[in-house]
Image (tube, rainbow, N blue to C red):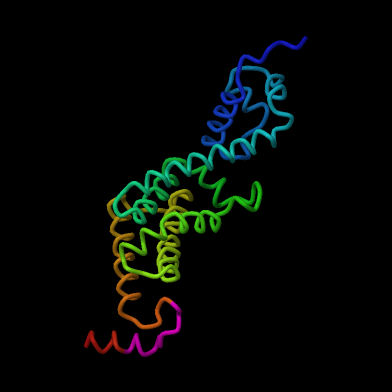
Amino acid sequence: MAPRNKFTREEMVAAAVRVVRAGGIDALTAKSLAGELGVSTQPIFTCFHTIDEAKREVCLAAEKMYEDYVKEGLSENPPFLGVGRKYICFAKEHPQLYRLLFLSAYGSENRSAMRALRHSQELIRESLQQTYCLDSQTADRYFRDMWLVAHSLATLIVTGNCTYSDQEIGRILTGFSVSLCKAIKEIPGFAENSFDIDAVFQELVEEGN
């Protein structure tokens, strides 16, 4: 009879997550996981049939962590800015997991930045409609543009290219939110992309003179 594995599957998955947080998904091997647990590689394959199975479990665990951040953001006021802040916070605190979920080709097509956009959009559409008195289509346009800003900032963070402080990031999100809302409210056809771009810019230039 084979000796009983002293680690549960949950403990092994947690250890695998630690390995990935430290070195990325490619760092997760039977040897590195065994080293994290302080055992030989034999117990690893008692728990997982292959190392790819362990990687899939890490993906699921990372998704759960991200969902928890989104839920925290939704509890803030206003919730749509809270989700943006938590999205950036997840990237800052777990850069390798962010890479895995949103900047990596690893895993299924269901794990992608665009899927995160659509999922978050559905969660806070109603809040946007009530707060800014928008219809669902305009609320989705507003959120899409705001989310693209948050995703850009998060990507700068995880790639080590963000020089902005938390306060500056907050001002960027707030400023863009105000500008976008003002454009939606005051420029006919803005949300539908049917407005006269040349006329709008000409008016802005004339106002500045």
At 36% across and 62% down in the image, what residue appears? 128
Residue at point 65%, 46% (across, down): 107
**Image point 40% across, 63% down: which residue?**
146
Residue, far right: 1
Residue 165 included in the magenta stretch of the image = no
Asked where in the image residue 197 lies, by quadrant, the reply is: bottom left
Is residue 99 toward the left or the right of residue 91 in the image? right
Q: Nearer the viewer, residue 178 or 72?
A: 72
Is the residue 10 above or below the residue 59 in the image? above
Q: Is residue 100 above or below residue 181?
A: above
Q: Residue sitting at 31 percent across and 76 percent down?
A: 185
Q: In the image shown, does 29 or 7 lie closer to the viewer? A: 7
Question: Residue 33 falls in which quadrant of the image?
Answer: top right
Magenta segment boundaries in residue numbering: 192-202
Could you tell me which quadrant the N terminus lies in?
A: top right
**Residue 141 found in image quarter:** bottom left
Residue 64: where, in percent of width, then height? 51, 40
Residue 79 place in picture, x, y as percent: 34, 53
Q: Where the C terminus falls, by quadrant? A: bottom left
Of residues 146 and 204, which is closer to you in this image? 146
Seen in the picture, residue 14 relative to 60 is either above or below; the reply is above
